[in-house]
Every structure is written in C-alpha cells, then in structure tokens.
Amino acid sequence: MSDPNPRPSRAQQRRRTERNILAAARQLFAELGYDRTTIRAVGRAAGVDAGLVMHYFGSKDELFSRATEPPVADPAAAGIPPDETPVGPPAGAGQAAEALLASLAGRLDGEPVASLAVLRSMLTNPEAADRYRALAESQLSQITAGIPTGDAELRASLLGAIVHGVIIERYLLRLGRLADASPEQIIDLLRPCFRLLTTAEAPAPTHPPAPHDGPGA
Amino acid sequence: MSDPNPRPSRAQQRRRTERNILAAARQLFAELGYDRTTIRAVGRAAGVDAGLVMHYFGSKDELFSRATEPPVADPAAAGIPPDETPVGPPAGAGQAAEALLASLAGRLDGEPVASLAVLRSMLTNPEAADRYRALAESQLSQITAGIPTGDAELRASLLGAIVHGVIIERYLLRLGRLADASPEQIIDLLRPCFRLLTTAEAPAPTHPPAPHDGPGA
DNA sequence: GTCTATACTCTGATAGAC
DNA sequence: GTCTATCAGAGTATAGAC
C-alpha cells in the first residue's frame, strides 16, 4: 500500500484546521464571553498561529458569527431531516407546555457550546444580543401559537424568560442547587407552571395580598 | 449675608465629585457592562479627568465594587430602619409566594441601576458573578425558609431563576412583550406559578407527556 | 488637591518573509 | 499556505506639573 491519500489535499486540511479553530473559539467564547476571548488565545487553543485565524475569518466578529451559528452545516450528510426544529412542534391546545418542557429537558443535559457562547455574551455584546433575539423570537412565535389566551405573547415571553433563566443559572452561573439537579427534577417542578401559563386559568382565584395591613404588633 | 459656606469645604466637595463619579460609573456599567466601560468614559460622563477617577478609587475593580454596592450608605441619616430587608420577611406557610411577588413587583418598575450593573456584567466578570451569587444566596435562604417541602432549596433556586430571567429580558435585553408589560400583568401571571412552587402540590396530577407516540403521519 | 502627560501592556489587524 | 514581525490604538495605572 502506498497510502492513497497521506495528506488530505489542502482543501480538506484547510477545512480541518478551520473546524479546529471554530471548536476552540466556541469553547472560549462560551467560557469567557466575547470581549475576554482573544484571537491569540483562540489560535493557541487550536494549535495554530493567531495570524492564521485572522487569515481564515477576517475579523473577530466574523469568527464569532461562524462559531455561534447553529452547527447544522449539511443536514443531508448527517442524515438528519433539516425541518426538525429543536423547539418542538406548535401542536394543539395544551400540548404546548409539554413541547416546551421536552425542549427544556434536552437543553438541561448538555446545552450545546455554541448556544452557551451566545448566552454568555448576549448581555455585553450587541451582535450576540441580536443573535439571541432572533433565536428567541422564532421560538416565541411557536410558543405563542400554542397558547389560546389573548395575552399569549406575554405568556410566551414569560416562558422564554423562565427557560433562559434556568439555563443561565445552571450552566453559566452554577448557582444554587440548579447546577447539579437532575433534568427530571427540574422538569417535574416546572411542569405545573408551564401548564398554567399555556392554558387559560382563572387569573386570580387565590386571595392576592392580605388586604388587612398591620402585622401582629 | 455673606454666604455662610460658598464652597463646601473640600471634604464635602470631594464627596460630591465622588458621588458624581459613582453615579456615572453605575450608569455606564449598567449599560455597557464591566469590560466595555472605560475609566476615561466614566471620567468624561462625570465631568472630571480620568486620572482623578483612578486617584479616588485606585483601580477599576474597586470602582466597580463601590458603584455596585447597595446604596444604603447611612440608614440612620435617611430615616429608614436598616432591618427592613427588601426581599420580604420569611413569613409563614403560603405567604412566601406573596412576599416574593411583592419584591418582584418593586423591581419590575424601576430596578435600581446598581443592580442592573451587576446583572449586566455577571456573565463575563468574575467579581460581578460573585456579587450576584452573594445577593442571590441570601435571598435563596429566605425563600427556602418559607417553603415546607423537602426540595425547598431547588424550588427556591427555580424561583430565583425565574425572577432574574424576567428582569434580564425586561431591562437588559428588552425582549418580546416583557419590556413594556405592566408590572401587575406580569405579577398576575406569575402568581399561580409562585404559589405552586412555594407549596407542596401533587407532583404529577396531570398526564405528563402523551404516552402514545407517533404523530399523525 | 486637581489635573496633565506618559509608561507599559495588550488588543485586533496588516504586511511581508519563508 | 503558513507564520513572524510589526502597526496603530485603547486599556489601566503611575509620576509629576500646577
């Protein structure tokens, strides 16, 4: 044997190092955020020179864009139907809660690094904020479609805020018991909440605040 | 009249410019986050030289610390009883939800700038993250105390995540309808959720996912 | 006490050597 | 194609002039 292709033919090699760079960038962006991640550190982590990173991607913004775009490069090659949106189908009536819970369950063990990179930087980087908004709004419209009440948009926004609050405290802040709780535990606690928010319930069945002021003094 | 104190006596003047610098720093930290806020910009916004900012606070970290610490400098002078914790008393049984809702309602119109500065930077700045953790854990223990179930800690963490998710999307991301909704609307929608999470309910009264798989294909 | 000038480091980005 | 050398600029922090 004379090794049919000992070197993967330039183009393949290029794609290979490009993938390495993107993987390293994703990791660093997710850990440190946009500002604190330097091109030099990305190059170091990928085993290449910082100049090469710039040569491939042109700018730090472009590198961030490429590193955080959804990893579905070619769904045909992976054998995954591209129409499978990860958030779940709109479904009818009360199934919106379960679809959302299923989506959350998937994210509660093993949120993809690209997504964490966006989340980490969205509060301090305008581009990351835009990317988050785009992602969130597409999910919002799906959730809104499954809620029958008139204030569906606000309810959907609330649900999105809950989901992302949980993800942030679990992965990015490692706060409280949320960091090590099992996905099932969290899902089970949130299920009734999500059911309430996705279906029309009596708005104020329980006495809101105690009307009588003055404690036991 | 010869103006009893035309110039406020150095020390007063110093406190005055110091307060100006702190106010400008709070604003910029809340808008841009720690990294993108520069000492020069703080000085410019406060109308003083950047070197003076350094002279007063020594370092950017110290400036951030001072700018984000709770504004209750001297409660005696303000006439506010210092024991009044802003999160609400532990209370008994089912009042934990109302106390938490009241705290959230207060934050939903006019979250203090110092708090926003911490929230904005907590994902990318370790010091801000620590400050947030300290604040969150003190609230967590209070909330936990009001929840009778065995998994009170996880429930409290979840409640904290919800609150902060809402605050983040409302003020920092301006997302969806959460940005302009009235506090009452949000509170009313969250009330049943909070009641569920602060009291022991049947864990799975509703059929979780539909056991029959296979959609209408 | 207040402010100006500057030192030093590090960033992203560019030009050119191999 | 890959990498070294370097640029221009901004950052924090310091020293010294008024």
Image: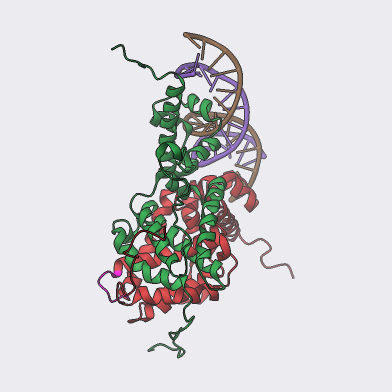
Chain colours: A red, B green, C purple, D brown
Residue A167 on image: x %, y %: 50, 63
Residue C14 on image: x %, y %: 50, 37
Residue B180 on image: x %, y %: 29, 56
> Residue at horizontal 69%, vertical 63%?
A6
Pick whichever, A48 or B61, lies toward us. Answer: B61
Pick whichever, A50 or B121, lies toward us. Answer: B121
Q: Is residue A74 shown to the viewer in this render? A: yes
> Residue at horizontal 58%, vertical 69%?
A181
**Residue A87 in the image: above or below residue B176:** below
Residue B72 on image: x %, y %: 45, 41
Give yes or no for residue B212 being in the magenta stretch: no
Residue B15 position by quadrant: top left
- Placement of the C terminus of chain A among the 4 image quadrants: bottom left
Pick out the residue farthest to the bottom.
B212
Residue stretch in magenta:
A147-152
Q: Is residue A70 shown to the viewer in this render? A: no
How many numbered circles are shown?
Answer: 0
- Placement of the N terminus of chain A among the 4 image quadrants: bottom right
